[in-house]
Image (tube, helix red, strand yellow):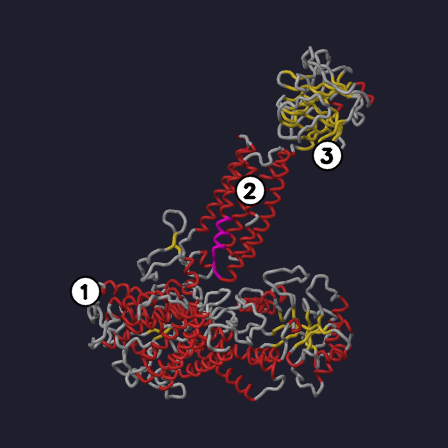
């Protein structure tokens, strides 16, 4: 290039008649093209001039051509219009992703034929000093271009914008030769052209042009489109559906996190693309995309808040629905933005396949998601079934979203109706269908028979599968009534005394309802009684596990009978509506009699539906644990009683007066009991003064019914007082505190009075097991015991919070007792001073009242009667109404037991006083009595099993006692008591490692006193043989108090990553164990060690292997721990699997322990061929 500028005038001759054998390449066909020509002499010698033509439409701001295979260091020829009909050719040095900088190159000359013509910029150039080129072979080139208006500059160093596109290719100069060393691009050239065009997206170039790389803009465009389509069309929707399909939050969260990271990767690609095309935040797609990814960034935080809320409350809340619907909205927005992206990409008709594929995938995912949202019509639906809860949705007939049931459906033979009230909003009833009051909720899956559950009453009932698992049924109404007086009447006296003597129980065994008498019954009361009686096992049937086949059969038949009872209640109620007058009569008027005789001669037929609802309310509570249906049945019974004016029977006497009075007051009792159990006024009650019906009478004890009802009224009053509370404020209102204090004192005095009245009439000191179960004196005694129990429980409810701060004790929610999900923030859980609260009692006084009341509950529970042994050999007590009272008493006794140990440790040192021991024994025996009572009920009623400790599923309990902050005598005694009660060994994971003399002191005389309580301790032999020799000497010494009861495990291997416990160390452990079989019985290892030095093994060698690091949910942690499953560990030779975090970090530790035990045992049986 000569001078400082190369600006060519408009040539007189137009370019291009016939070019020489120049080679051309058009990266943008018809818009951007380049040509090269090499004189033959230059090609032969390998040096000389090269002729280049750069051609582009004037719609381009600039076009560049460079020598090299990448931008950095390339020799660039940049062409742009000067605004006056000419072009500027600027020689520049490439700087990677920065604008190339101008460098003077005297060897480059702008030739004739250059300028603007016919809407194109043309630059014909001659490069005489392009030393980088090899004229006889291929050379790497690159090109770039930018759309836009004319740059209009003659400045060789003008600012140019970032390119819209670029291409990489190579040119074979041996195929671009021309015959002469003259400008081949003007009419005077004597060589014909050999033009070739192509691009990365078009036909393959020829004439010595090889495209190295397609358009990178297109590559970025494809990458961005594919990544973001996968993220929003597949990734996020599938992650959302995984939660409903698998109900595993960890899988859902992990999947969505991976997709979230992929979204940011796609966003990074899109950002790069937008910057290179100068479209960043300049049109709808990029603007919406930026906003969208920012909004999505909030979703993981909302998911974390939802998870925390669900763990605490066991149900969804506002944050949960915000997380769900916010996520769904973002997915839809992402799909819409994907469509905008396709529009922006400007896909041609040749690319319609991509658009069709996108739309099809969106439609399929949307349909799949809708199928997960909608009820699938099953009962229960899939979503409710995997969550083990009752289904409350029905499929939509219009194909839209699911709708909540608003009114009770008309009952059919296969559907249990909700007769009384429409269901409230879902958010208000979720907690009612959970295991309320500590009861175990039975799912619909459990209510169906296994192996053909739905076939009750059909010809294919599956009876052959249950030959050995019979169910109790009666063949006449008289037999049903007789059994009612044997098993139910003492606890639930809804009928008058029997009119004929009670005879021995005579049930029949069935394995199916097909053809049985109860199917032909039309009395709802007889069917409801049959449903309760079907739950009682036969004398030769042992209590069975929850998931055995026997109880599901009893459960299913009982539930079928309960459904039939509800259908009969509905049928009776249609006739009752036409009964004239305010008082029930034995037979309705107006020619519409109920076509049956009364079940009990002294009870009118019209009352049987009401009495059946009372029994079914109890059935829903104690058998199914369904608080909502318990309340619904009781509410319907109360409404029926009011409609029949049973609450206003003062001065009314006839042959049915006693039956009507019992019907009313038992309806009142059941409604009040629902409020007590639910801890709220769940059934709206009128002012008691409006109820003028006299109390029922019991021969020889006219006071027992008023006492029975009054004890329940006191319990309900304590519930209302607790619910009222004291509003939190900086300065509590003294008047409000004083008022509540006075109410507590008054209720406590009233409860004490009722307890004394109840005990006055109790003459029997033991359990009256041999009295006639239908006798009125026995019913009176039972009612007095229940009154004393309920009044004592009311005192506990009044003072429990004050005495024990409502500290969580049980692993699950029982009645109004907290679970460990809520732990009070307190430094000392046993209060020592009396703060200014509303209670008139000090902490110690409140605790003493609670303990006294708990002991009274225990004493009265022992007095509750069993059925007469002359009438039945089944010790089954039914229809309990004092379960929460028993749980309150258990809570108090265990908390007091803990308080006594702490106080003894702080005040008495190691000395146990006689009074202390006496009190502890009293609490222990009383607690055993309560547990025995609950066991008796639970053998019949499954829901009560939620109140029992599910039992230990462990053989060895592993401890790290040095991490226990308050280790002391109470810890040692507690561990030993639990081990003795549940029959497990204690394994202290101490990993003793020191010289022999030191470990002897650590083990037997140290502060931790390990030898006193740990059956097993593990050792590391890093210090040599002396550690095993020393401890063997200790445990085999004749004076050692636990001789023969202690043993050691050698730490042969560890599960942590990079462990050094391998090789010769492991071999030495095996050798030491073989030398000390009297004290060492096994190893902590990851596998069986029988193959280690087998030649030294004895003939009867049988060391056990304990394997740690067992976890079903994780493969390791961030601190090097490595996990394996029970099946993997047992398969490698483990005899004991140790699952720590896998159990205590689980939401339900008991269920987790059972799962690990079962999977380990199954794997063990497979290993040994069992």
Asked if 37 appears above or below 735 in the picture, the reply is above
Which percent across, then down, holds residue 452? 41, 63
User: Bounds of the magenta span?
Assistant: 314-327
Q: Nearer the viewer, mark 2 or mark 1?
A: 2
Q: Name the residue under label 3.
A: 96
Which percent across, then down, holds residue 753? 38, 82
Q: Residue at x 51, y 82 (%)?
A: 924
* The residue positioned farthest toward the right in the image shown: 45
Q: Residues within 10 Å of mark 1 (few under 14, many from 20)?
A: few
Q: Which of 825 and 127 is in front in this view?
A: 825
Q: Mark 2 points at which residue?
A: 291
Q: What's the distance in space between the residues labelled 2 and 1, CA to CA?
A: 71 Å
Q: What's the distance in space between the residues labelled 3 and 2, CA to CA?
A: 31 Å
Which percent across, then down, holds residue 681? 37, 67
User: What SS does tag 2 mark?
Assistant: helix
Discs 3, 2 touching: Cβ within 8 Å = no
Could you say which quadrant of the image residue 583 lies in? bottom left
Q: How crowded is mark 3: few (under 14 residues within 10 Å), some or many (20 or more)?
A: few
Q: Name the residue under label 1.
A: 592
Asked if 175 appears above or below 318 in the picture, the reply is above
Could you say which quadrant of the image residue 976 lies in? bottom right
Q: Nearer the viewer, mark 3 or mark 2?
A: 2
Asked if 798 appears above or below 1111 in the picture, the reply is below
Which percent across, then down, holds residue 935? 45, 77
User: What SS does tag 3 mark?
Assistant: loop
Of marks 1 and 3, which one's residue comes earlier in the chain?
Answer: 3
Q: Which of 318 and 329 is in front in this view?
A: 318
Q: Quadrant of the N terminus?
A: top right
User: What SS does tag 1 mark?
Assistant: loop
Q: Is residue 553 visible?
A: no
Query: Main structural element of the magenta stretch: helix, strand or loop?
Result: helix
């Amino acid at each position: 290039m000569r001078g400082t500028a190369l600006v060519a005038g408009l040539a007189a001759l137009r370019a291009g008649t016939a070019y020489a054998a120049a080679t051309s390449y058009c990266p943008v066909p018809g818009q951007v093209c380049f040509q090269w020509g090499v004189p033959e002499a230059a090609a032969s010698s390998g040096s000389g001039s090269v002729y280049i033509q750069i051609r582009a439409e004037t719609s381009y701001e600039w076009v560049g051509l460079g020598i090299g295979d990448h931008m950095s260091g390339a020799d660039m020829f940049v062409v742009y219009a000067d605004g006056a009909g000419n072009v500027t050719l600027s020689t520049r040095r490439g700087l990677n992703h920065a604008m190339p900088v101008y460098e003077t190159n005297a060897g480059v000359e702008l030739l004739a034929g250059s300028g603007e013509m016919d809407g194109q910029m043309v630059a014909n150039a001659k490069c005489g000093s392009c030393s980088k080129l090899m004229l006889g072979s291929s050379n790497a080139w690159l090109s770039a271009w930018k759309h836009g208006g004319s740059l209009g500059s003659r400045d060789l160093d003008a600012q140019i914008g970032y390119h819209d596109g670029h291409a990489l290719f190579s040119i074979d100069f041996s195929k671009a030769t021309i015959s002469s060393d003259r400008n081949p691009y003007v009419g005077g050239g004597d060589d014909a052209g050999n033009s070739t065009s192509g691009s990365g997206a078009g036909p393959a170039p020829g004439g010595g042009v090889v495209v190295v790389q397609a358009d990178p803009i297109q590559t970025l465009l494809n990458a961005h489109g594919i990544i973001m389509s996968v993220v929003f069309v597949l990734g996020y929707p599938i992650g959302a559906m995984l939660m409903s399909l698998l109900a595993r939050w960890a899988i859902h969260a992990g999947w969505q996190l991976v997709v979230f990271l992929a979204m940011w990767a796609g966003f990074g690609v899109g950002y790069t693309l937008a910057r290179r095309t100068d479209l960043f935040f300049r049109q709808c797609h990029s603007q919406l995309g930026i906003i969208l990814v920012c909004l999505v960034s909030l979703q993981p935080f909302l998911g974390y808040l939802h998870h925390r809320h669900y763990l605490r409350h066991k149900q969804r809340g506002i944050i949960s629905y915000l997380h769900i619907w916010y996520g769904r909205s973002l997915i839809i927005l992402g799909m819409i933005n994907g469509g905008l992206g396709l529009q922006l990409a400007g896909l041609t008709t040749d690319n319609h396949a991509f658009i069709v594929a996108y739309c099809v995938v969106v439609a399929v995912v949307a349909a799949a998601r809708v199928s997960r949202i909608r009820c699938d019509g099953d009962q229960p639906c899939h979503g409710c079934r995997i969550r083990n809860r009752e289904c409350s949705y029905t499929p939509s007939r219009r194909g839209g979203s699911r709708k909540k049931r608003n009114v009770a459906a008309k009952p059919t033979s296969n559907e249990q109706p909700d007769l009384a009230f429409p269901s409230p909003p879902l958010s208000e009833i979720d907690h009612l269908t959970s295991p309320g009051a500590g009861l175990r909720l039975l799912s619909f899956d459990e209510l169906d028979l296994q192996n053909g559950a739905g076939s009750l009453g059909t010809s294919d009932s599956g009876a052959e599968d249950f030959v050995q698992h019979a169910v109790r049924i009666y063949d006449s109404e008289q037999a049903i009534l007789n059994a009612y007086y044997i098993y139910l009447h003492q606890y639930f006296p809804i009928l008058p005394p029997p009119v004929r003597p009670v005879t021995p129980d005579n049930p029949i065994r069935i394995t199916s309802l097909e053809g049985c008498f109860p199917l032909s019954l039309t009395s709802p009361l007889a069917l409801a009684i049959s449903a309760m009686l079907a739950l009682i096992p036969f004398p030769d049937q042992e209590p069975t596990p929850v998931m055995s086949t026997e109880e599901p059969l009893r459960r299913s038949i009982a539930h079928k009978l309960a459904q039939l009872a509800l259908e009969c209640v509905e049928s009776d109620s249609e006739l009752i509506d036409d009964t004239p007058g305010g008082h029930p009569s034995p037979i309705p008027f107006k020619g519409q009699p109920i076509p049956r005789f009364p079940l009990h001669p002294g009870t009118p037929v019209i009352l049987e539906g009401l009495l059946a609802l009372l029994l079914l309310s109890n059935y829903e509570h104690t058998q199914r644990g369904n608080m909502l249906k318990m309340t619904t049945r009781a509410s319907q019974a109360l409404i029926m009683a009011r409609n029949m004016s049973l609450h206003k029977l003062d001065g009314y006497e006839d042959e049915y007066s006693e039956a009507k009075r019992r019907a009313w007051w038992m309806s009142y009792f059941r409604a009040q009991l629902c409020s007590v159990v639910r801890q709220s006024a769940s059934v709206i009650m009128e002012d008691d003064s409006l109820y003028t019906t006299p109390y029922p009478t019991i021969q020889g004890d006219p006071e027992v019914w008023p006492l029975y009802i009054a004890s329940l009224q006191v319990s309900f009053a304590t519930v209302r007082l607790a619910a009222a509370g004291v509003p939190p404020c900086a300065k509590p209102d003294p008047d409000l505190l004083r008022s509540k204090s006075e109410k507590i004192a008054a209720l406590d005095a009233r409860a004490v009075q009722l307890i004394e009245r109840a005990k006055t009439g109790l003459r029997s000191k033991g359990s009256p097991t041999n009295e006639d179960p239908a006798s009125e004196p026995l019913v009176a005694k039972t009612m007095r015991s229940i009154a004393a129990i309920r009044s004592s429980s009311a005192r506990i409810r009044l003072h429990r919070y004050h005495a024990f701060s409502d500290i969580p004790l049980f692993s699950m929610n029982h009645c109004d007792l907290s679970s460990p999900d809520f732990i009070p923030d307190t430094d000392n859980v046993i209060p020592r001073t009396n703060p200014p609260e509303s209670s008139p009692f000090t902490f110690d006084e409140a605790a003493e009242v609670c303990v006294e009341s708990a002991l009274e509950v225990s004493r009265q529970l022992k007095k509750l009667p069993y059925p007469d042994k002359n009438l039945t050999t089944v010790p089954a007590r039914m229809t309990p109404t004092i379960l929460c009272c028993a749980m309150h008493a258990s809570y108090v006794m265990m908390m007091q037991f803990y308080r006594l140990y702490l106080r003894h440790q702080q005040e008495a040192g190691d000395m146990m006083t006689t009074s202390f021991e006496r009190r502890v024994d009293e609490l222990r025996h009383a607690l055993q009595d309560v547990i025995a009572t609950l066991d008796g009920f639970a053998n019949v009623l499954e829901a009560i099993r939620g109140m029992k400790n599910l039992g230990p599923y462990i053989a060895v309990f592993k401890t790290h006692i040095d991490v226990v902050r308050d280790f002391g005598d109470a810890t040692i005694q507690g561990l030993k008591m639990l081990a003795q009660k549940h029959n497990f060994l204690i394994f202290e994971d101490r990993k003793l490692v020191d010289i022999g003399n030191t470990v002897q002191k650590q083990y037997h005389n140290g502060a931790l006193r390990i030898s006193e309580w740990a059956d097993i301790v593990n050792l590391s032999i890093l210090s040599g043989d002396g550690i095993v020799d020393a401890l063997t000497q200790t445990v085999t010494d004749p004076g050692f108090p636990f001789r023969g009861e202690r043993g050691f495990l050698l730490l042969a291997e560890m599960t942590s990553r990079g462990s050094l416990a391998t090789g010769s160390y492991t071999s030495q452990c095996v050798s030491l164990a073989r030398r000390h079989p009297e004290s060492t019985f096994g190893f902590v290892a990851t596998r069986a060690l029988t193959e280690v030095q087998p030649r030294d093994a004895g003939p009867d060698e049988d060391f056990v292997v304990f394997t740690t690091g067992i976890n079903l949910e994780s493969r390791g942690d961030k601190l090097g721990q490595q996990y394996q499953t029970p099946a993997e560990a047992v398969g490698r030779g483990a005899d004991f699997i140790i699952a720590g975090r896998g159990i205590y970090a689980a939401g339900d530790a008991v269920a987790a322990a059972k799962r690990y035990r079962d999977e380990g045992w199954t794997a063990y049986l497979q290993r040994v061929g069992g």
